[in-house]
Image (spheres, coloured by chain):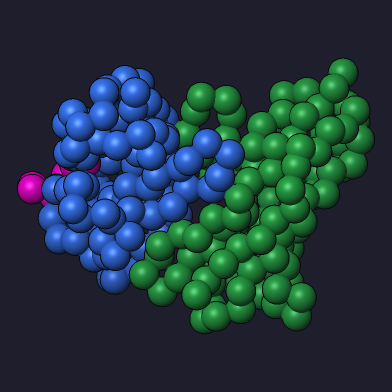
Chain colours: A green, B blue
Amino acid sequence: GDSVTQMEGPVTLSEEAFLTINCTYTATGYPSLFWYVQYPGEGLQLLLKATKADDKGSNKGFEATYRKETTSFHLEKGSVQVSDSAVYFCARNNAGNMLTFGGGTRLMVKP
Amino acid sequence: EAEVAQSPRYKITEKSQAVAFWCDPISGHATLYWYRQILGQGPELLVQFQDESVVDDSQLPKDRFSAERLKGVDSTLKIQPAELGDSAMYLCASSLSVAGRSYEQYFGPGTRLTVT
């Protein structure tokens, strides 16, 4: 079945450091790929998305490129801030638009 | 900005009791989803509605869980009887659906259930 695998956390960085959170997905069908962010005690917010191979999603300084050849959708940000501390979820959809999520990666940014 | 509304935000119940959660999707969103998120894990889909019809409930434990969306707008998820293992965050999401294609999902704040 569909699955999404992302690097385990926590990831601890200093402010202004470069961030990469790895994500790979099963290559069944033609999924859209998503990154969601969850702040403590809150629901999920869509951070960015890509709908086809080689698309780059971007938002708030975060970027991710849909790589079909490596079945990856790694999240990157050039300079993280303390306010970026949260849990990040990679997800793919299926033909019925049901989402399959990775296990989440907690990011902690220290001043 | 329109949001998905959920209530209550927090619920504590004893095992074997009944509990219900409510979700009001973004206006105009025909597709509604209920997810369960166990602490430290990603959300898992329980049930998907298209208008008032269930599209997929294959992961819904039907011996104790039920979901309805009678008028195709708001929805209720019920657990009866609750078990300790049901402690989790219950998330509702909605998405626009046009000509059979669904778009990105928007999530509500969730209901955190604790079963004692």
The image position of residue A80, as x and y in percent, is 82, 33
The answer to which quarter of the image holds residue A110 is top right
Q: Residue at x 38, y 39 (%)?
A: B85
Q: Residue at x 52, y 71 (%)?
A: A2
The answer to whether residue A86 is left or right of residue A21 is left
The answer to whether residue A47 is left or right of residue B15 is right
The image position of residue B68, as x and y in percent, is 14, 48
- Whether residue B3 appears in this view of the structure is no
Q: Quick one: which residue is furthest to the left in this view?
A: B70
The front one of B30 and A9 is A9
Residue B71 sits inside the magenta stretch: yes
Residue B87 sits inside the magenta stretch: no
Q: Residue at x 56, y 45 (%)?
A: B41
The front one of A38 and A52 is A38
Q: Which quadrant is home to the C terminus of chain A? A: top right
Residues in magenta? B69-77
The answer to which quarter of the image holds residue A24 is bottom right
Would you say the magenta stretch is mainly helix, strand or loop?
Answer: loop
